[in-house]
Image (tube, helix red, strand yellow):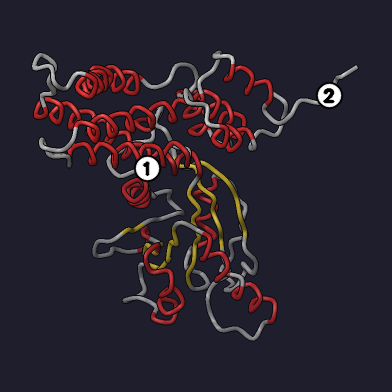
Amino acid sequence: MGVRLAKPGEFTQRALLNGKQSLLAVEALKDLVSAATDTQLRMAQACLGAWPEWIEKAKTRLAPWIARAEAVLDYGDDEIIQLDFNTLQAEIALIRETFHVEQMRSSAARWLRDGIRVALVGRPNSGKSTLFNALAGEDRAIVTEIPGTTRDVLEIRTEWSGLPLYLFDTAGLRNSNDPVERLGVARVAGVLEKVDLILHLLPLMDQGSDLEILNRLAPFQGKVLEVRTFGDQGRGAGGIVVSAMTGDLQALKVALQDRFLGPHSPDACLGALATLRQREVLDELVFQSDLVLGLSESCPPELVASALQGMWALLARLTGEDRVESTLDQVFSGFCLGK
């Protein structure tokens, strides 16, 4: 009778094509379905419905200048129709600042949307499993005073202080004659390659750094953060000092938020554009704005009109008004159900 199963996201795609949904709302719906933490859920909900107000304001400010630039092309010989280049660039500078602000919010929001992959590494009995349990909010890793208790990689997805985390507890790094422990140590390198941050844990009582482990971490130096553990058992001279036993993890919270969110709090990222597609369009909008600002007053009016049209086209691509087939395929391929 011509009945078939709906393709992935087909009902939502039809709503988009019939003007019932914007592309941004469709992407938010996709994030809503896949949300695994409260923060991710709130971020998706904040993007449902109408697109962000700043997009409409940018289009409103840009439209008269596009019309004026097109008029100059058609009636350039008419002295009445002229393009005030200085005023145009002042207006574009304001629009560009809006794009830049959203670009920065987007860079922070991506971590809340995608989650932060964090590996805990260090010597045996450096406090890895205790910190792992504290961040996870449950006892997932066995904690004993016997070195080498953790022999495999433990993984958990959780939310801590508003940050979605993928935590990896690894075997203590040392030379061992135990074949099982050696296998656990060998697996650590594979984990370090795929994470976003490596927390190198050092007991506060230890003097200096562990050179052997520093050599192991050297290839990943750009994403290593040294954390001093057992903060309740002594006093350290600065740095990130924590005590998982007492729950004093404030220094680690500040360090993670500064590293991944910058000046933005998790709440400040609500409503920001965070998907890879959205971030790429935002980057192009900033670049296109810089292109307009780099034009000289003596340049042909065709260049001005083309550059302004480019900005308008990028805004249309952002909201899905241009409905580029490849963009739609990219979005809906991630839907697992007909809805």
Q: Residue furthest right?
A: 1
Badge 2: few (under 14), some or many (20 or more) residues near its Cα, within 10 Å? Answer: few
Q: Residue at x 25, y 36 (%)?
A: 289
Who's the residue at 26% across and 18% down the image? 67
Number of on-image labels: 2
Q: Is residue 298 left or right of residue 282?
A: left
x and y percentages locating residue 26 in the rendered image: 55, 25
Query: In the rendered view of the protein, which quadrant contains the N terminus?
Result: top right
Q: Nearer the viewer, residue 256 or 298?
A: 298
Return the residue found at the far bottom. Answer: 177
Amino acid type assigned to the residue bearing label 1 in the image: Ser
2 or 1: tag closer to the N-terminus: 2
Rounded to the nearest angstrom, the CA distance separating label 2 from label 1 is 41 Å
Q: What's the mark number on residue 165?
A: none
Kindly check if marks 2 and 1 are in contact, taking CB atoms under 8 A apart as contact: no
Residue at the (66%, 76%) spot, across then down: 183
Rendered location of residue 273, percent (x, y):
42, 33
Of residues 182 and 112, which is closer to you in this image? 112
In this picture, residue 214 sits left or right of residue 195: left
Amino acid carrying label 2: it is Arg
What label sits on residue 4 in the rendered view?
A: 2
The residue pinned by badge 1 equals 107
Decide: few, some or many residues near mark 1? Use Cα within 10 Å; few <14, some 14-19, many ≥20.
many
Under tag 1, what secondary structure?
A: helix
237 or 23, which is in the foreground?
Answer: 23
Viewport quadrant of the C terminus = top right
In percent of the image, x 43 and y 50: which residue is there? 246
From what the image shows, is residue 151 above or below residue 43?
Answer: below
**Residue 200 location in percent, x, y?**
42, 66
Asked which quadrant contains residue 107, the reply is top left
State the SS at label 2. Answer: loop
